[in-house]
Image (cartoon, rainbow, N blue to C red):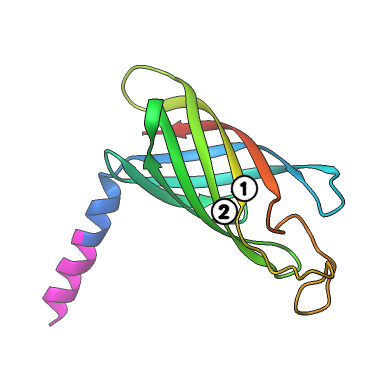
Amino acid sequence: MKLVTKLTVVATLATFMFAGMNLTWGNAYSNTATDDLAVSNQFGVWLDVNDSMSFGWEGSGIKVGFDGPAGMTVRLGYDTTATGNVGTTLGMGRTWWTSTGDGWGTSLSTALDFNMTGGVGPDGLDGAGNTADNIAAGAWTLTMNLGFGF
């Protein structure tokens, strides 16, 4: 049984070892509950599942990306905030520039995500009585990232 467990662990790690991996770092611009512009730094890690799909963590949530039209990426996400609100996001992303060559690749990308759901009620408060924050339905986040991948 130990041999089967070891082989399973090695096979699982090998799938990630040969997968494309991209580390991102950039700025996120979003609107708040009072429609003010908020700016924050963000970091992300993306793994390629196959040629047309990837998943990862970016900013404050889990994201899945699918190939879309005209070189775009359709993004689905599940995000959280500091006050505990959660929401699903739908967005589009575009990689504008990618370096060529072997080894580490560099890229510049932009994504726009819209929050589809949120934990905010019609009174502007979530279920715990906290005021609404930038995860409210209809809020948006524009990210500009520098990526390093292989």
Q: Mark 1 or mark 2, which has the lower sequence index?
A: 2
Left or right side of 116 for 67 = left
Secondary structure beneath dot 1 equals: strand
How far apart are the alpha carbons under marks 1 and 2?
Answer: 5 Å
Tell me where residue 50 sits by quadrant.
Answer: top left
Residue at the location (79% across, 59% down)?
A: 133
| Residues at discs 1 and 2 in contact (Cβ within 8 Å) | yes
Q: Is residue 33 above or below residue 98?
A: below
Residue identified by numbered label 1: 114
Residue 8, image quadrant: bottom left
What residue is shown with label 2?
89
Give left or right: position of 33 versus 3: right
From the viewer's side, name the closer residue of 27 and 33: 33
Tell me where residue 106 appears, x and y as whole percent: 46, 25
Q: Main secondary structure of the magenta part?
A: helix
Q: Position of residue 67 (x, y in %)?
A: 36, 38
Q: Amino acid at mark 1?
A: Phe
Which residue is at a point 23% across and 66% down the rendered structure image? 9
Q: Which residue is outermost to the top?
A: 100
Q: Amino acid at mark 2?
A: Thr
The N terminus is located in which quarter? Answer: bottom left
Examine the rendered structure and indicate whether residue 52 appears above or below residue 87.
above
Residue 59 position in % (x across, y down)? 61, 50
